[in-house]
Amino acid sequence: MPRKQKKPCAVPGCPNLTDGRYCEKHRQQANKDYDRYYRSRENYDRYHNKGWKAIRAAQLHRQPLCERCMQNGRYVTATLVHHIKPLSEGGSHAPDNLMSLCDSCHGTIHASHGDRWHKTNGTGSRNAGEKENVV
């Protein structure tokens, strides 16, 4: 199956082509900016500690492939661990509340909830009553 055509990096004036929004050169800075200016300090501390890193590594060892892609018959290496029920809504780090995802699927979930790329209800979480839409 052919790959998608690469597109220009989102940084104005950058000539690099990329599969995502930013090229390798600018991706790390974009993530730092997001963590610094948009993500709450509580969330930053939650995911930048030894305990979470160990839980994340164990989950990726248990399930090294993206769970959503596998449901669609694709085999893609998982790079992220997602909380099915967010910690901010009472979720936990329990294995049954975690799922291994590729970057694309993880971004799709968060974009559909509006917690990173779209407006939220002002609290940083999705609107009350919305359910996890993972098939």
Image (spheres, rainbow, N blue to C red):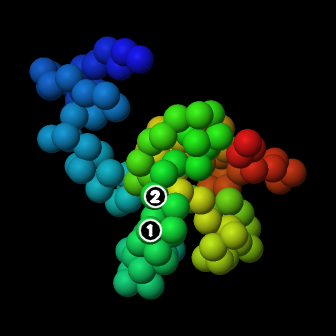
User: Do the residues bearing badges 2 and 1 touch, measured as CB atoms within 8 Å?
Assistant: yes
What residue is disc 2 on? 64
| Quadrant of res 71 | top right
State the quadrant of the N terminus: top left
> Toward the viewer: 22 or 102?
102
Residue sitting at x 75%, y 50%: 132
Mark 1 nearby-residue class (10 Å; few <14, some 14–19, many ≥20): few
- Tell me, for residue 53, which label it has, or none: none
Q: How far from the left and from the top, in percent, is residue 36?
A: 35, 60
What residue is disc 1 on? 61
Q: How far from the left and from the top, in percent, is residue 67?
A: 59, 49
Q: How far from the left and from the top, in percent, is residue 93?
A: 61, 76
Disc 1, SS = helix
Residue sitting at x 71%, y 45%: 134
Q: Is residue 47 above or below residue 73?
A: below
Disc 2, SS = loop
Q: Is residue 85 above or below residue 104?
A: below
**Three-letter residue code for mark 2:** Pro
> Toward the viewer: 119 or 73?
73
From the viewer's perspective, tell me whether residue 60 is left or right of residue 94. Answer: left
